[in-house]
C-alpha cells in the first residue's frame, strides 16, 4: 500500500532500532523507555503481531504495531515522524493494519492514548474510534489515558 510517495510494508529486523527511537521520541516522551530495540525485535518476530512501517526512499516515516487475538486486535503503538505528519502517513498505516484485522475476521480494535493528547484523540475519532473508558494513572502512574475502540465492519462472504 502506498500514499503519496511512501510505501507500507512489514518491518524487518533492520527497522527495529529506528522504530524504537521514534517510539521513545514521539510516544514514550516523559516516561521510561519500554519499547526498546529488543522489544521491537520480539514484536517483529511474533506471529501474532504485525509491525508495519511507512517508508520513503528507505527513510522511516512512521510505524504501527498491532497484536492480534481470537476476536480482537490491540494497537500497541502508532507513530509518525513529525516531519512527515499531516501527509496521510498515519492514516495509511492505520488503514493497513485495520485491513489485516478484517481479513483475519476480527470484530474490534482497541488502543490506549494519553488523555491529554488532543491530536491523537482527534485522529482516532476521525477514523471511527470511540472512547470507552478513562484510565487513571495508566501510564506508569504518571499520566492518565483513555481506551478507544472501533468495531470493524466485517465483509460477508
Image (cartoon, helix red, strand yellow):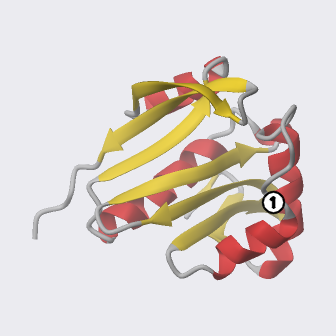
Residue 17 in the image: state x and y as whole percent.
Answer: 89, 66
Left or right of residue 85: residue 99: left
Q: Nearer the viewer, residue 90 or 40?
A: 40
Q: Which residue is mark 1?
A: 19
- The residue at 42%/58% (across/down) is 73
Residue at 65% x, 48% y: name it. 78
In the image, residue 109 above or below residue 15: above
What secondary structure is marked by label 1? helix
Q: How many marks?
A: 1
User: Image point 47% across, 52% down: which residue?
Assistant: 95
Which residue is at the far left? Answer: 157
Tell me which residue sits at (72%, 36%) in the image.
140
* Up-down relation of residue 143 to residue 87 (above or below): above
**Is residue 152 among the parts visible in the rendering?**
yes
Q: Which image quarter: residue 15?
A: bottom right
Q: Position of residue 155 (x, y in %)?
A: 18, 61
Q: Residues within 10 Å of mark 1 (few under 14, many from 20)?
A: many
| 40 sits left or right of 123 in the view | right
Residue 37 is situated, as x and y percent measured from the top left of the image, at: 85, 67
Of the 4 image quadrants, the one containing the C terminus is bottom left
Amino acid at each position: 500500500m502506498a500514499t503519496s510517495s511512501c510505501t507500507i510494508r512489514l518491518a524487518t529486523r533492520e527497522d527495529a532500532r529506528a522504530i524504537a527511537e521514534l517510539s521513545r521520541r514521539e510516544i514514550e516522551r516523559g516516561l521510561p523507555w519500554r519499547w526498546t530495540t529488543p522489544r521491537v525485535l520480539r514484536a517483529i518476530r511474533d506471529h501474532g503481531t504485525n509491525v508495519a512501517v511507512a517508508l520513503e526512499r528507505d527513510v522511516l516515516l512512521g510505524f504501527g504495531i498491532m497484536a492480534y487475538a481470537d476476536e480482537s486486535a490491540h494497537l500497541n503503538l502508532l507513530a509518525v515522524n513529525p516531519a512527515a505528519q499531516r501527509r496521510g502517513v498515519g492514516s495509511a498505516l492505520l488503514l493497513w493494519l485495520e485491513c489485516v484485522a478484517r481479513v483475519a475476521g476480527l470484530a474490534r480494535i482497541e488502543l490506549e492514548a494519553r488523555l491529554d493528547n488532543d491530536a491523537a484523540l482527534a485522529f482516532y475519532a476521525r477514523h471511527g474510534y470511540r472512547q470507552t473508558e478513562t484510565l487513571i494513572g495508566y501510564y506508569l502512574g504518571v499520566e492518565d489515558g483513555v481506551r478507544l475502540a472501533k468495531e470493524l465492519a466485517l465483509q460477508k462472504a
